[in-house]
Image: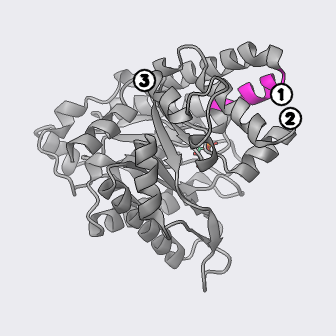
Amino acid sequence: MPELRETAACLVAQPKGILAADESIATMSKRLQEAGVAASDTTRRDYRELLLTTPKLGTWIAGIIWCDETLRQRLADGTPFPEACADRGIHPGIKVDTGVVPLAFAGGAVVTQGLDGLRNRLTEYRQMGATFAKWRAVLDPGNLPPRAVHANAHALACYAASCQEAGIVPIVEPEVLMDGAHGIDLCQVVTTSALTAVFDELHAMGVDPSGIVLKPNMVIAGTAHQDYTSAAQVAEATVAVLRACVPGAVPGIAFLSGGQSNDQACANLTAINQVAAGSGGVPWRLTFSFGRALVSDALHTWHGDVGAVEAAQQALAANCARAAAASAAGGGAPRDHLLAGATSGARATPGTRNMEAVGA
Ligand code: 13P
């Protein structure tokens, strides 16, 4: 599937990343209201237009994830959002999951829905210009029975296969939440088990790993944990998990920010790239697909004021530039070198896949 591989590689091309602006109508309305803006389809559109029309956005951003409402909207000048993205050299993407529901016999753990009708929706989104999609599984480390890991991994794989069949690159997002008082060790265990299940299911469903982008959490302590996790700790744990779980054929890993500030998320991404480069390199690009860590400053600077659009766009541009610099820290992944000999199913475990790939 050469087109999928090309799009996936483009979405993570150095030094770019992906902007997540796909909040549901309910979440976006809440965030607007918190910023003092009355929520409506027009203000949601105005805010997304502010983001997209930020000067030079395509310098740092390869793709933007929208929700269904935005993909169908037009800028004030009448240009449809997908076309306005393409005009700026930015891939338009679409969130296709429909949120979470409690999973049976899982003690309150949830599973993400959205497979019903997905095939037809993907066909329509492709016709509208979307080149990639997103599906987010929500995993609470404080309440995660094995069947919730399995059900979410299976749904992600069914979604990813449907996307590839439709010519759309799937972003595969199993998010281990930062909410809670858990330590980094539990996050590491849970993220390992989630990613292992996800790649097993992707393989079982026939998904080509070279035509996806993985969007995981960083391995980090919960927000209510007693100790602060340093960037060095986050980086060591995150790179170890990725090496153990992610096939070398995956072109890129684009982290979510999960509620971290731009400073924290960028410091951690910088350290992750430095650790990866310092330990012989990794076969994937390690970049960002942040939501809040990129856009929160812009939203609060704007707060619905036409006169503040330029300042808001400058805030977004500064956050994107920092994230792009973090994604290129450590010199970026020497991917071609490491990929020589990598096969699609193999994981990048040190001593096995990576070492074979570098000729050891
Ligand atoms: P955050 O970076 O705000 O976590 O959002 C990323 C995202 O797309 C969550 O699904």
Left or right: 245 in relation to 42: left
Marks 2 and 3, Cα distance to the nearest angstrom? 30 Å
Q: Which residue is drawn at the image coordinates 32% and 66% (left, top)?
A: 200
* Magenta stretch holds residue 301: yes
- Please tell me whether mark 1 sits on a helix, a strand or a loop: loop
Q: Which residue is drawn at the image coordinates 83% and 27% (left, top)?
A: 304
- Please tell me whether mark 2 sits on a helix, a strand or a loop: loop
The image shows residue 218 at horizontal and vertical percentages of: 53, 45
Determine which of the numbered discs, if any, sits on residue 37 in the image: 2
The image shows residue 197 at horizontal and vertical percentages of: 40, 67
Q: Which residue is drawn at the image coordinates 67% and 18% (left, top)?
A: 313
Left or right: 252 in relation to 65: left
Determine which of the numbered discs, if any, sits on residue 303 in the image: 1
Whichever of labels 3 and 1 marks the residue nearer the N terminus, that label is 3
Pick the front one: 322 or 67:
67
The image shows residue 20 at horizontal and vertical percentages of: 57, 39
Left or right: 275 in relation to 97: left
Q: Which residue is mark 3?
A: 89
Pick the front one: 229 or 282:
282
Q: Main secondary structure of the magenta part?
A: helix
Marks 2 and 1, Cα distance to the nearest angstrom? 6 Å
- Mark 2 touching mark 1, by CB under 8 A? yes
- Mark 3 touching mark 1, by CB under 8 A? no
Q: What's the residue type where badge 1 is placed?
A: His
